[in-house]
Image: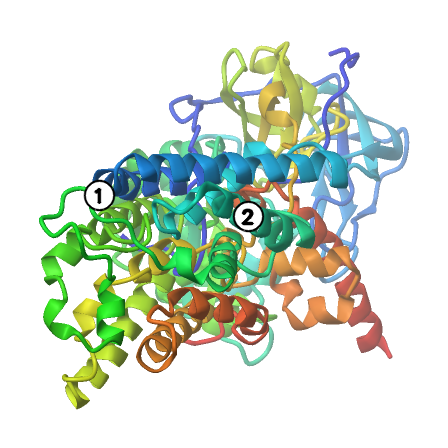
């Protein structure tokens, strides 16, 4: 079985919710829809306070080329447009909606009927995806229509579907692949048409045999789509790592996947594409794993964007007594929440509760130069060095040592026997070095 | 939901691999156990006493220094002082007078390790530097080897390398005897087989990677092999080189010390090759019969430079 060829780790899987079918979350009393749920410019609101909105109605328009539309996940009245502390820990503008009902916009197909046929031109497919406000749902939240529009001169020859879900605990993509395999296959065919590629590969880690089997079965009529089981290896879901694992091509430092002819889309995104193109349904809900060792019942829920995370935790039996940290996302790359009433966003793949015993950092000692971080780094960097250089604020050297290539996967900190907060320092270094590079380019 | 509870907020990753410094040190100590048992078998209770003195004095000096000079919490629980003591004992004759062992411990811990800031900050391998310090300070005691407990020939005290230096190839023990360790020498260095078992354990538990031991052993084999092919009356055969003196102990346990070896695999290969070449050069052309300790210490000094010039292969640097 294949995997990427450099670094990586094997954290414990802890896929507690792997066997739990997706259930539907009830609507909250008040929803809170963030205006910036994607990389790029925040969306610009097109509704005002007091306006009545229907489910699926446009709330905010993309604020630039790299941006995304945002639609209302609820039917009700716009209570206010105000700041809310989101998963980043910073206050961000959001539209608050008092939920009254669930009346959908006209033209949205809410039936479960599978629609295979699509007569749209590639450009029309991309337009529909842009209209629906779809972003990368693996967590990076990069607007999908931008990925489907390669820069001039660059041509994609392979579409890679990311069903890896290498983060421990998370099971949302796994459940989606098992329960919505047919829809995902239609979605893949739509994306292949939009990109005009002749080949697609679905990469799935070997700990999801049921997903591999179902998708292999569903793709029998389409020889151009291959299901590729991959070795379990974190961070295989990283875009560059997955391309390396599937195609043996490596994207150069600072390059784009399309430089090596690849476009990567997450399975959640593919499902959203199916719904947008075939069912006219904008991206207003997603599957979220609610999980953690002390939770009464880890679940996978389909939640409307804007639902408070606290109500998802309640659906899983409530915040346990010894739950000390609530994370939006997985344990390796997720963000610890200061405010558990923060809303579900398009990129919220999971809500993870970490127990007291695991939540506290361990005591730090001096680096013993064991080089385990160097071996673990999937980008071939030297985390011990980058961290030390950042600590000493030597920004010219951090740049020379390729600090901007860091994907913040956390393998170095996870591996460090001295418990050093390597990635914390590297993040500071990336921020400073990136700012200096941008300032120099602006000159 | 009420939020009366304060949540912990920190940056990712939120889980840790559960590896720790003391676990790594434990694994190295465990890997040294077979060789330790062999040395007790070959040298009797002397080996046990010398080891105990070395470990207790190394740990004692580290404790006193952290407590009264650094005024910091004790670092004994990382087990590195224990390992230094064990390795120091492995590198001296089993019946070395106890006060010389204590002096070696002061030098290893006080001068080589703690004066640089303790574990992680030292430039040279403490146990090896301690051994070399003793070798130049007490040359007589450090090169007088005890008779073997289970040897038919209980008189001889010359190590294989000393025999080679003297040109006395006829009296060299057989390869098998050297492999099993039934030859005079420093306490822990004689049993090549037991050391190999230990290093295999370290490789299997991913405590170390193969790069340093393999590059040292390969370089010594190739280089001494070339010399042997040139003139087999002057130079020993490569297998004798591999099995004699501190080579196996040095290649497997001393050169692989985390703190003083390079960070990248490329660097580790260069470091290992450097040790191999220097060892053979010192053994064949130097005034000492044994060159492993000096070779490792010289390459320890070069390690920071190797780290500057040998970078790991970056992702995407080489296509396909």
- Where B57 falls versus A225 (above or below)? above
Residue to which mark 2 is pinned:
B103
Q: Nearer the viewer, residue B97 or A25?
A: B97
| Crowd class of label 2 (few under 14; some 14 to 19; many from 20; radius 10 Å) | some
Q: Nearer the viewer, residue A356 or A181?
A: A356
- Say left or right for A147 vs B170: right
Q: Are marks 2 and 1 on the same chain?
A: yes
Q: Chain of mark 2?
A: B
User: Which quadrant does the N terminus of chain B fall into?
Assistant: top right
Q: Quadrant of residue A216?
A: top left
- Say left or right for A355 vs A53: left
Residue to which mark 1 is pinned:
B42
Q: Residue furthest bottom?
A: B230
Q: Quadrant of residue A75?
A: top right
Mark 2: secondary structure: helix
Q: Residue at x 50, y 42 (%)?
A: A268
Residue B87: tell me if it is visible: yes
Q: Chain of mark 1?
A: B
Q: Residue at x 52, y 11 (%)?
A: A296
**3D distance between C-alphas at marks 2 and 1:** 25 Å
- Say left or right for B289 vs A126: left
Q: Quadrant of residue A213?
A: top left
Among the two numbered marks 2 and 1 on one chain, the one whose residue lies closer to the N terminus = 1
């Amino acid at each position: 079985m294949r995997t990427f060829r450099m670094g990586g780790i094997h954290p414990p899987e802890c896929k507690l919710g792997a066997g739990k079918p997706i259930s539907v979350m009830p609507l909250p009393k008040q929803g809170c829809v963030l205006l910036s749920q994607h990389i790029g410019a925040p969306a610009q609101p097109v509704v005002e306070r007091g306006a009545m909105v229907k489910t699926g109605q446009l709330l905010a328009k993309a604020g630039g080329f790299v941006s995304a539309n945002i639609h209302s996940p609820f039917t009700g009245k716009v209570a206010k447009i105000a700041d809310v502390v989101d998963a980043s820990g910073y206050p961000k503008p959001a539209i608050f909606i008092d939920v009254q009902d669930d009346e959908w916009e006209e033209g949205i197909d809410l039936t479960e009927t599978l629609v295979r046929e699509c007569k749209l031109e590639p450009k029309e497919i991309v337009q529909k995806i842009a209209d629906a406000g779809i972003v990368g749902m693996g967590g990076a939240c990069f607007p999908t229509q931008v990925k489907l529009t390669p820069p001039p001169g660059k041509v994609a020859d392979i579409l890679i579907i990311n069903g890896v879900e290498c983060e421990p605990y998370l099971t949302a993509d796994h459940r989606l692949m098992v329960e919505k395999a047919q829809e995902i296959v239609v979605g893949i065919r739509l994306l292949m048409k939009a990109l005009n590629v002749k080949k697609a590969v679905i990469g799935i880690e070997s700990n999801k045999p049921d997903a591999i089997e179902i998708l292999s079965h569903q793709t029998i009529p389409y020889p151009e789509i291959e299901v590729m089981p991959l070795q379990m290896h974190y961070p295989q879901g990283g875009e560059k790592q997955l391309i390396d694992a599937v195609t043996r091509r490596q994207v150069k430092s600072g390059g784009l996947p399309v430089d090596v002819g690849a476009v990567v889309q997450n399975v959640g995104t593919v499902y959203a594409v199916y719904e947008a193109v075939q069912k006219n349904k904008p991206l207003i809900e997603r599957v979220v794993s609610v999980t953690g060792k002390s939770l009464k019942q880890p679940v996978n829920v389909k939640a409307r964007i804007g639902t408070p995370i606290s109500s998802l935790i309640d659906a899983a039996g409530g915040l346990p007594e010894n739950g000390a940290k609530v994370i939006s996302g997985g344990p390796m790359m997720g963000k610890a929440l200061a405010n558990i009433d923060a809303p579900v966003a398009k990129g919220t793949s999971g809500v993870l509760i970490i127990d007291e015993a695991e939540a506290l950092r361990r005591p730090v000692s001096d680096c013993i130069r064991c080089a385990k971080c160097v071996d673990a780094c999937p980008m071939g960097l030297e985390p011990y060095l980058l961290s030390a250089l950042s600590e000493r604020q030597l920004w010219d050297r951090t740049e020379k040592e390729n600090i901007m290539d860091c994907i913040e996967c956390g393998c170095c900190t996870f591996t460090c026997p001295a418990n050093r907060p390597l990635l914390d320092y590297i993040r500071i270094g990336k921020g400073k070095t990136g700012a200096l590079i941008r300032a120099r380019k602006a000159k | 939901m009420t939020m009366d509870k304060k949540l912990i907020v920190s940056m990712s990753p939120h889980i840790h691999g559960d590896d720790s410094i003391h676990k790594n040190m434990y694994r190295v100590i465990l890997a040294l156990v077979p060789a330790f048992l062999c040395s007790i078998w070959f040298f009797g209770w002397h080996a046990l006493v010398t080891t105990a003195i070395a470990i207790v004095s190394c740990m004692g000096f580290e404790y006193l220094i952290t407590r009264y000079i650094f005024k910091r919490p004790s670092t004994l629980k990382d087990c590195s002082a224990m390992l230094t003591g064990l390795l120091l004992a492995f590198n001296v004759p089993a019946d070395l007078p106890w006060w010389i062992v204590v002096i070696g411990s002061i030098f290893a811990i006080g001068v080589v390790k703690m004066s640089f800031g303790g574990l992680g900050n030292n430039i040279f391998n403490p146990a090896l530097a301690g051994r070399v310090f003793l070798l130049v300070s007490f040359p007589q005691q450090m090169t007088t080897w005890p008779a073997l407990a289970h040897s038919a020939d209980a008189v001889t005290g010359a190590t294989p390398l000393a025999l080679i230096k003297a040109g006395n190839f006829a009296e060299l023990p057989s390869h098998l005897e050297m492999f099993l360790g039934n030859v005079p020498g420093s306490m822990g260095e004689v049993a090549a087989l037991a050391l190999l078992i230990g290093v295999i354990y370290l490789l299997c538990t991913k405590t170390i990677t193969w790069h340093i031991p393999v590059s040292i052993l390969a370089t010594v084999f190739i280089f001494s092999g070339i010399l042997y092919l040139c003139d087999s009356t002057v130079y020993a055969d490569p297998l004798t080189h591999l099995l004699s003196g501190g080579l196996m102990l040095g290649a497997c346990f001393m050169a692989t010390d985390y703190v003083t070896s390079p960070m990248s695999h490329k660097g580790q290969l260069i470091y290992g090759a450097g040790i191999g070449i220097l060892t053979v050069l010192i053994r064949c052309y130097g005034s000492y019969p044994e060159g492993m300790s000096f070779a490792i210490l010289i390459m320890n000094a070069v390690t920071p430079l190797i780290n500057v010039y040998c970078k790991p292969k970056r992702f995407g640097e080489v296509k396909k």
